[in-house]
Image: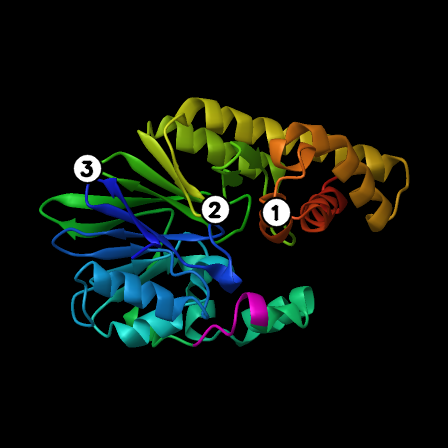
Amino acid sequence: MDNVRPLGGDVYEIDTRMAGYSGITAGYLILGDRPCLVETGTSTSAPIVRDALSSLGVGPGDLATVVVTHIHLDHAGGVGDIADYYPSAEIVVHEKGARHLADPSRLMSSAKMVWGDKLDVLFGALAPTDAARIRALGDTGSIDLGNGRTLSSHYSPGHAKHHVGLLDSLTGDLYVGDAAGVYLPETGDLRPATPPPDFDLDIALDSIALFQALGPQRLLFSHYGPVDEVTEILERSAEELRVWVDLTRQARTEGLDLDHAVAMVRDRTRERYTALRNDDPTAEQFELLSGAPSNVAGILHWLDRIPDA
């Protein structure tokens, strides 16, 4: 299939074709003795992901585990549908996200407030998963991939309080979710993802430092794809966070409202990104996944919560 790409080590990248776009959100299949799907994509992507797994020989009874880095709908919106397709699979998520997969009503209500009429087109509806099939992880945990191979989970909030990074013991691949930002492989651009309500700069920087300390061989971005320059990209990720926070803090100090703060930050960061500088078509992906309004709103929400901001 044209949306499946082998990455070595029995790892396959699956383009979930979120909202009909290519190169927006990736899921990953680790095809070992106990096949494991990392990230489901959205609910509307679930049939595409199922077809991709089928093309790799994974049938309804074969998938052992589904694990998500966090419960935002572009990563976990398809969990309920995928759980129905693969009745033997265990669903693994951080403990702060587990109840929302069992009862998605609050999560969907919040998403409706943020996305409005775009919700159905972009994400669809997260279907509930039987709580008995959900395994909730603490700050660390381990997923058995078979033959002694494991996927270790490392709590990495900052982007979201229910976020984990996942390290493959065989390949050294680290699945970074959104904690290291949004990466555009076409241009090499990296941009932070700092949405409300959970963003916290200090915790986000600690998560990036944790990723560095784990010594991964490669980073696998949910948005989007593999990156080999581990140290360089994680350093850039931290730098991007600081730049966006500094600019947003400046706008806040100047008393700008949200719209004017967004306009200022957008203008002053534009030159950092090839996609925006050159009006590249991929710039649309940035605005969908890491839009300036969402990023600035998340930073302002954090600044409002901390003393002496």
Q: Residue at position x 34%, y 32% from top? A: 218
Majority secondary structure in the magenta region: loop
Circle 1: residue type? Ser
Asked if disc 1 and disc 2 are in contact, CB closer than 8 Å, the reply is yes
Residue type highlighted by circle 3: Leu
Picture coordinates of residue 33 (x, y %)? 11, 54
300 in relation to 123, above or below: above
Let me know if residue 73 appears in the view: no
Q: Who's the residue at 71% across and 33% down the image?
A: 270
State the residue position of label 3: 170
Helix or strand or loop: what does disc 1 sit on?
A: loop
Tell which circle, 1 or 2, labels the residue nearer the N-terminal end. Answer: 2
Residues packed near mark 1 inside 10 Å, few (<14), some (14 to 19) or many (20 plus): many
Tell me: 254 left or right of 40: right
Give the spatial CA distance, label 3 vs label 2. 23 Å
- Assign a secondary structure to mark 2: loop
- Give yes or no for residue 186 being in the magenta stretch: no
Q: CA distance from mark 1 to mark 3?
A: 31 Å
Frontmost of labels 3 and 2 is 2
Q: Earlier in the sequence, mark 3 or mark 2?
A: 3
Look at the image and say whether residue 124 sits in the magenta stretch: yes
**Numbered mark located on residue 223 in the image:** 2
Query: x%, y% of residue 127?
Result: 44, 76
Q: Mark 1 sits on what residue? A: 290
Q: Quadrant of the C terminus?
A: top right
Q: Which span of residues is magenta-colored? A: 121-127
Q: Position of residue 276 (x, y in %)?
A: 67, 37
User: Residue pushed farthest left?
Assistant: 147
Give the crowd class for mark 3: few <14, some 14-19, many >=20 residues within 10 Å: few
Return the residue nearer the eye: 268 or 156. Answer: 268
In the image, residue 210 above or below residue 220: above
